[in-house]
Image (tube, rainbow, N blue to C red):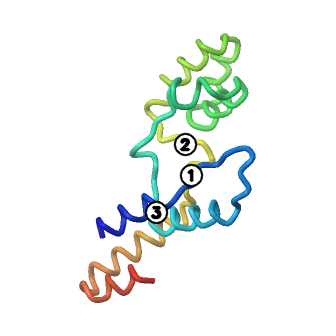
Amino acid sequence: MAIFAHCAALTINAVKLPRDLRPRALATADKLAEAVALDMTGYWRPTVRTYLGRVTKARILEAVREAVSTEAADRIADMKKPDMAEAAEQLLAATDWLPALMRTPQVAQQDVAQSVADAATDGPAKAYANAAE
């Protein structure tokens, strides 16, 4: 499985660029992310360097509203962008917030969790059959 994961990682490119006309490639990457229940909350945090410093003030406030509260967003709304981004980084650090592009639907994660539980009770042969599907 580790070799399969390594090969897949070398061949999949899900980077979304403004003028990129690869809708099938991005749809395939989305399907793969759903199939493996990709959860980026364990690997990525919104920081000034990785996200907050690159988006508009409106997006920063939207993220804080969504992850923390409307009151928290209102407290930082009058700040200049660099200060707002740093304050938002502090507020978002304790949350599992992700931008919409990095989210995987919850339904897929629940289905995979169920199939993993089924595979554990059905034995190795059934697990390999499920993985092949």
Q: Position of residue 45 (x, y in %)?
A: 46, 36
The answer to which of marks 2 and 3 sits earlier in the sequence is: 3
| Residue assigned mark 2 | 98
Question: Image check: 123 left or right of 46?
Answer: left
Residue at (55%, 66%) from the top-left corner?
Answer: 107
Badge 1 local density, few (<14 within 10 Å), some, or many (20+)? some
Tell me the tag on residue 2. Answer: none
Along the viewing direction, whichever of 75 and 49 lies nearer the viewer: 49
Query: Residue 103 shows which numbered tag?
Result: 1
* Mark 3–mark 1 distance (CA, rounded to whole Å): 10 Å
Q: Where residue 112 sits in the image (x, y, percent)?
A: 44, 71
| Above or below for 132 versus 86 | below
Mark 1 lies on a secondary structure that is loop
First of labels 2, 1 by sequence position: 2
Left or right, 112 with reference to 72: left
Q: Secondary structure at mark 3?
A: loop
Asked if 42 appears above or below 53 in the picture, the reply is below
Tell me which label, 3 or 1, sits earlier in the chain: 3
Q: Quadrant of the C terminus?
A: bottom left
SS category of the residue bearing label 2: loop
Classify 10 Å Cα crowding around label 3: few (below 14), some (14-19), many (20 and above).
some
Measured Cα–Cα span from mark 2 to mark 1: 6 Å
Residue that carries the numbered disc 3 in the rendered image: 37
